[in-house]
Image: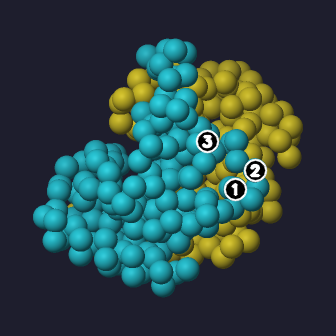
Chain colours: A yellow, B cyan
Amino acid sequence: MWWTDEQWSELIDPARCGMCADAHLEENEHSILVGSTEATYFRLVRNQAHAGYSVVILREHVTDLDRLDALQLNAFWHDVQRAGKAVGAAFTPRKIDYLVMGHRAPHLHCHVFPQHRDDDPLRNVDIAEGPVYLSASELGGSVAALRETWRDFA
Amino acid sequence: MWWTDEQWSELIDPARCGMCADAHLEENEHSILVGSTEATYFRLVRNQAHAGYSVVILREHVTDLDRLDALQLNAFWHDVQRAGKAVGAAFTPRKIDYLVMGHRAPHLHCHVFPQHRDDDPLRNVDIAEGPVYLSASELGGSVAALRETWRDFA
């Protein structure tokens, strides 16, 4: 069963939204800030089972894609595409998936989810795969590499 | 393991691409045409395990989102958003997921994948769930309803 109306009201309440609270932080429980634009935050996810797995989070607390006006929609997907180009350049995956879900955190964000040589293309995509946590220096290296390619695609 | 280079070359070859061959058809093995724009085809998927499950397919044979120029990117997501609004109005889901994958068919398309009252928000999303095939008259009714709401959001 889906969330009850009461649970859903809590999840979409900006005052209680986890992403509103931590999407801008340099580091949070889930991810590290790579860069930001006027519209979005771009973060490398700590679980690097898929190297380069990142997320682009809209600054504004909007639950669904259909609520965006044309300018917001263009800005969001411009930033997601830029993130994908940066992930492609830094991590050379075979393919990148772009997933907008947000069942647990209904604050608009897109998972930039790379598929690499060792990944089975016929397996159902699962962002929770792993987890694989890098050492602090490895993670720092990945963030630095991604910051550089992200700037290249400005 | 991911596709070999040889397999991938075949999959991305427009001359052998299944979507290039059948995305414009009134009916194909996977889906029914709801409508089209200059940029995309909008189709209701035959597997209606998630009522309203649809797909928006770029007319042009482009493998990855990062290859689109700004105008194409805006047009594609405008059409996906319109599809989402139409699915929302016709099927009243609790949430809609937007999934760009294409491991088997690397011709850019976005799954518009509704979540309803009976769906578990914590279950990993799987577009292959079911399958649930409607009767011809039920399927026709769904297509007709979706055509109407899709026109409303033109």
* Residue highlighted by disc 2: B69
Q: Residue at x 13, y 64 (%)?
A: B135
Quadrant of the rendering where the N terminus of chain A is positioned: bottom left
Q: CA distance from mark 3 to mark 2?
A: 11 Å
Count the marks: 3
Specify the subunit that label 1 lies on.
Answer: B
Q: Residue at x 39, y 82 (%)?
A: B148
Q: Which circle marks residue B62 in the picture?
A: 3
Instruction: From the viewer's perspective, tell me whether residue B72 is left or right of residue B154.
Output: right
Say above or below: A150 vs A58: above
- 3 and 2 marks in contact (CB < 8 Å): no
Q: Amino acid at mark 3?
A: Val
Q: Amino acid at mark 2?
A: Asp
- Residue sitting nearer the eye, A31 or A150: A150
Would you call the spot at circle 3 few (<14 residues within 10 Å), some (14-19), or many (20 or more)?
Answer: some
Q: Quadrant of residue B18?
A: top left
Callout 2: SS: loop
* Residue highlighted by disc 1: B72
